[in-house]
Amino acid sequence: MRDYLLTLCVTAAVTYLLTGPVRKFAIAAGAMTAIRARDVHREVTPRLGGIAMFFGLCAGLLVADNLQNLNGVFELSNEPRALLSGAALIWLVGVLDDKFELDALVKLGAQMIAAGVMVMQGLTILWIPVPGVGTVSLTDWQGTLLTVALVVVTINAVNFVDGLDGLAAGMVCIAAAAFFLYAYRIWYGYGVEAAAPATLFAAILMGMCLGFLPHNMAPARIFMGDSGSMLLGLVLSSGAISVTGQVDPDALKIFEGGTREATHAALPVFIPLLLPLTIIAIPFADLVLAIVRRTWNGQSPFAADRGHLHHRLLEIGHSKTRAVLIMYFWSALIAFGVVLYSVHSASMWILLLIVALSAVGLGLLLLPRFKPRAPRWAEAFVPPRYRRRRRPAVQDGETAELAYEAPEMAEDRTPVPAGVNGATAMGARSRLPDRWKTGSSR
């Protein structure tokens, strides 16, 4: 664990220290995100944050290769080299896209090629554990297709959720932390050496995100761009592929004893079928909804719009910071809930805790609908959003009357309903005040 923490810290430090120079380079190179009608940010912001992340990845792998307890990963497995090869390719394409705006189909082809490069070097799914059936071996073609599909879906899911300051990096960091705990338990708890590469990938991924987040939190000084979002998605999918298709369930020796005991003991093996999906559940749901919405409206699935999940949170009244924190909460609940259930599946308290936290999350989602208003005598002691709006003075002879009304009742703040919660899924966007406008900062 000490070596993993050292690798994480080195990766985070390199990423953090390089992000500042990369920002200056992006400004000099003209790799800037212009202000568009659908954007939230009000200043032209540089991209290319993925450059710092990539060098952080290289530094993490280099440090791990020189640590006594981790260099065995490089001697016994070719997966770290496969990851570096695929990451270099997808990162290069992302840098070109941040500068020259490549076509979406070109990026999709590059994602498939990067996945194919990793497959050729051994990072592929060899078998799948299926409940009630056991271990199902895959042919070369089946393993290749499944690996490429998982890489492409994960990359685009992370890319789609990259719409607010700090959102994508924070959600991927949460997913990587949950995945690290799961993979480390398989490697250290069960003594399965095949899970060591996935544990290393998760630790490095956390370092990349933690090093970049201080520069990317609102107000962001730099965006990761496609060079960063695609890189994060590829590293995340690589860990999932490694622990799902490389760890042999029979090596855990769990299929012993009675049926009930074997079922509970087998859960840590079957969890890889769900964990790669649950750790990207929120981005994946956003990806599916975006494709359905755009296809239904006769648009390209890759066309940008204002109907993402974080846009909807802004539409119903959440601030940008609160929307990001809510997305963090749900990502952590899903990812850590699945990992916790895999450890103590027989405990009813785990399920009750997840249900209770889900209720809290729903309450946070609806918070703008039940925003309290302070009494008039206490308005000077509360933030402006909890105060009532003051009407202009009404002159009636020598008498002036001040009237108060709630902000949501003011005429200039009345939205015109459009679609679900004012989002643009099925209709024109609501005519909301400027500070309520939503959009992607990308």
Image (cartoon, rainbow, N blue to C red):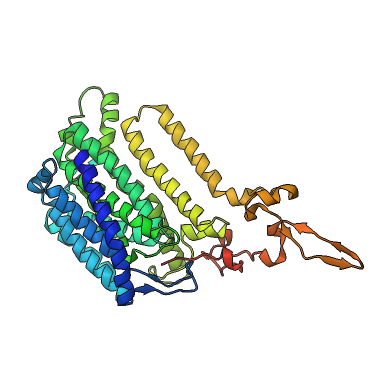
Comparing 194 with 402, the one in front is 402
Residue 376: x %, y % from top left: 74, 50
Q: Is residue 6 above or below residue 153?
A: above
Q: Nearer the viewer, residue 202 or 131?
A: 202
- Residue 368 in the image: x percent, y percent? 60, 52
Q: Where's residue 129, x and y in %?
A: 23, 41
Residue 356, compared with residue 442, is above or below; it is above
For the residue pair 270 and 222, the one nearer the viewer reads as: 222
Residue 34 lies in quadrant: bottom left
Question: Residue 107: x percent and y percent?
Answer: 28, 69
Question: Is 74 left or right of 130, judged from the image as shown?
Answer: left
Whether residue 366 is visible, yes or no, is: yes
Residue at x-position 15% and y-position 53%: 62
Q: Residue furthest top?
A: 258
Q: Residue at x 50, y 52 (%)?
A: 322
Location of residue 169 by image quarter: bottom left
- Looking at this view, name the residue that lies furthest to the right: 397
Residue at horizontal 27 percent and vertical 52 percent from the top = 12
Q: In this view of the protein, can residue 142 be seen by the observer?
A: no
In the image, 391: left or right of 353? right
Which quadrant of the figure contains the N terminus?
A: top left
| Residue pictured at 70% horizontal, 51% vertical | 379
**Foreground pick, 62 / 378:** 378
The quarter in which the C terminus is drawn is: bottom left
Please count the marks in the image.
0
Q: What is the residue that sits farthest to the left in this orientation?
A: 75
